[in-house]
Amino acid sequence: MNQIVRMSRRSFVIGSAAVGGGLALGLELPSGLGEAAAAASEPEVNAWVVIRPDETVVIRVAKSEMGQGTITGLAQLVAEELDCDWSKVAVEYPTPGQNLARKQAWGTMFTAGSRGIRESQELVRKGGAAARQMLIQAAANAWNVPPSECGVASGVIEHKPSGRTTTFGKVADAAGKLQPPKDVSLKDPKDWKIAGKPLKRLDTVDKLTGKLVYGIDVKLPGMLNAAIKECPVFGGKLKSFDDEKVTGMKGVRKVVGVGETGVAVVAHTWWQAKTALDALPVEWDQGENSKISSVSIAEWLKAGLDVEQAFVGNQNGDVKAALASAARKVEAIYSYPYQNHATMEPMNTTALYTADRCEVWCPTQNGDTALAAVIEASGLPAANCDVHKVPLGGGFGRRTFTDYIRQAVAIAKETPGTPVKLLWSREEDMTHGHYHPVTQAKLIGGFDGNGTLIALHMRISGQSILASVRPEGLQNGRDPVAFQGLNPSGPESAIGYTIPNLLIDHSMRNPPVPPGFWRGVNINHNAIYLECFMDELAHSVGQDPLEFRRKLMTQHPKHLAVLDAVAEKIGWEKSPPEGIHRGLAQMMAFGSYVAAAAEISVSNGNKIKVHRIVAATDCGTAVNPAQIDRQIAGSFVYGLSALFYQECTLNGGRIEQEHFDSYDSMRIAQMPNIESIVMPSGGFWGGVGEPTICVAAPAVLNAFFNATGQRLRSFPLKNQNIQFA
Amino acid sequence: MPRLVVNGKTHDVDADPNTPLLWVLREQIGLTGTKYGCGIAQCGACTVHVDGTAVRSCSLPVSEAEGKQITTIEGLAQNGVLHPVQKAWLEHDVPQCGYCQTGMIMAVAALLTEKPKPTDADIDSTITNICRCGTFQQVRAAIHAATDA
């Protein structure tokens, strides 16, 4: 309990500072100065560190908190270099407008790809170290002594020869006036006292009492509420609506077309807006995609499994020749569906537009692109726009998009001077996502006469996320991210096997369904394809799946280390208890090495009980092992929910699953016991929010084969009447 | 005009009687700790107590809540002292994004009123809230800790 930070409403800036000045949410109009006003009246040592006279250390965090613990981890890194008192730490967000005005002083605000900590760790640690140096210098100046004679511990600066002391709070004002040091040295992680420790999160208390203000909870004086419907068919347009039918309904203020594709009702309350929207006669121009269905997409993808042309992601040797000469061949086809992120908090944004200013309050994973969207949608100069980031009720990649922000600004332009909160219904959220892409894979393995794997061809056919979301990231048409976890080498997502003749290629087929980065991204299917098929290959030659893998992993010691760790802890060498069956999987992605071993039982041939999972992560450097443990455990909820339940199907060009009754998620009853092994090997910084998700499904699927002799190759499992017990 | 008693206070609200209790709490009484997740009583983010029983307020017309004692997450702590479930949640650092947790806590608080020492089976059959971050391991540990307190 000693590390729980008791923050007052005043100091808990994230959450309450969402609205101007950081105080009195809903009681005063945002000044537009917002967080900047708060900062200006307080001693800012540098962009990262503000120290108040009462010794509160406010650490500024640019990344978005969405449950992954990034604000706590980043604050630990700053606090470590600063040598402050952790119990006095609070955190706040700079606004994207401030970031723009200060020439990206806080780096990129993009919070996805498990990059929150690993990509900004150096920047924030240097920020903390620079602030520490300036605080020491300020104290040394006051004492007229050389700074080299001074030391710091827990926010107290001591002049060692004389024993004089002062505190950060007393010298912060003077420190902020000094020139920042040109260069600072950073601590060796082995000397860390705050970072690297399993500290509790900084943002918990208000989550327990209902006080935390998420985007959906933002309330501004005089605010109206809006509900929206976009054309249910992707690519379709709004043809007409009959607003006379609803304008007399209680609370309704206005019905507005939103762009070319949507219509919104603005009302006093959201419930009134939604009720009127449901009653509003709307005609859609469905466009050419109304003929698209999951069946037609699957047929198109299936054809891609055998076409000649494909983008190559990983190639060595001569697969064709090796397979032609193989003594034994094994072949399998897998497929993976569209899935919605299903954040618990539906998309929303509150916008206030006036003739010369536009501000929004929104849950976003990328403050910078959110601001760009506001600038574009409002048509106002950048300096006249800002975004106030609020805590996210889940992100999982969905809130890297700005569709809901643009809509809110478009609606607010229809009510100038009056703030409007746009909230999507769950139905809207389910049917207008940016979905986990759909793919299929055909895998062919070849053995020589001695049962040695000599060739593997993995053909992926399906949708590219980049082609839709960031086409400038394509390389001569090829999507490098499609090969996540399968690359020949590199620090991000390399394959863990050496196979003499290998070809992994991608036939890109992009249906007219918006894809997105869905927690884990392309490893979710790539790991199922690779790791289930490695199991198939092992069993086909009567080899133990662990031993079979180990022989191919001798040149991949970090991949092997996590696999060995889970195998050892689950007791792979010994037979499992009666009725229990085991499966393994490993993968590298987001710069980290992960593995899982599952223990399951199967009743009636179709009811799976997942009893126990051992999961190992080598993320290089562990900033907060307790939060990593929680990301690992949570990954199995996300990954196994996807495996058992989740699929978005299309019929008539529209998503069929509109609710949580047809798009279910795991509950506590299905939760296995997760034993995590956090084993940072040092020397690199890997991500933790996403990698483990991808080993959840193949570990359980491989255990299911051991239990039943049956291979499951299409998902979700509910379609094959396979359920949680 | 429905009259509601929420966290011990009486509110006369101007709402259509069919309006779900959730939206009256959030938009008219200003208690936004109760969350909208699905609107069809699947996820439990909107859980409140009605006469001491856990109810998914997104699917309860406000007219049916009249004359009953409604408790929301804002009314769970008494005199500034966190409820034992909230304390256990704090001790176990349960929330991730936190959005579902107020509903989860209300569901658990109601369970503990009925069964002060719930078994794992009791928890499995009663706590059916969705958490997309996947906090269930901590949730279970915190429930048992709250009952041991």
Image (cartoon, rainbow, N blue to C red):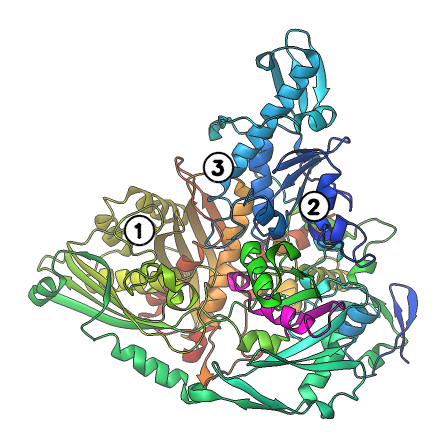
Q: Nearer the viewer, mark 2 or mark 1?
A: 2
Mark sitting earlier along the chain (3/1): 3
Mark sitting earlier along the chain (2/1): 2
Locate residue A326 relative to residue A254 in the image: left or right: left
**The quadrant where residue A240 appears:** bottom right
Q: Position of residue A394 (x, y in %)?
A: 59, 60
For label 2, the crowd category at 10 Å Cα-Cα, with few meaning under 14, some 14 to 19 and many 20 or more, is some
Q: Nearer the viewer, mark 3 or mark 2?
A: 2
Subunit of label 3: A
Checking the image for residue A123, the label placed there is none
Do marks 2 and 1 both belong to one polypeptide chain? yes
Query: Which residue in the structure is indicated by mark 2?
Result: A36
**A73, A51: nearer the viewer:** A51
Q: Position of residue A141 (x, y in %)?
A: 66, 16
Identify the magenta region.
A396-424
Residue B63: tell me if it is visible.
yes
**A362, A305: nearer the viewer:** A362
Query: Which residue in the structure is indicated by mark 3?
Result: A122
Q: Residue at x 62, y 62 (%)?
A: A380
- Check the image and report above or below for A540 versus A165: below
Q: Residue at x 47, y 51 (%)?
A: A114
The Cα–Cα distance between marks 2 and 1, rounded to whole angstroms, is: 43 Å
Locate residue A39 relative to residue A581 in the image: left or right: right
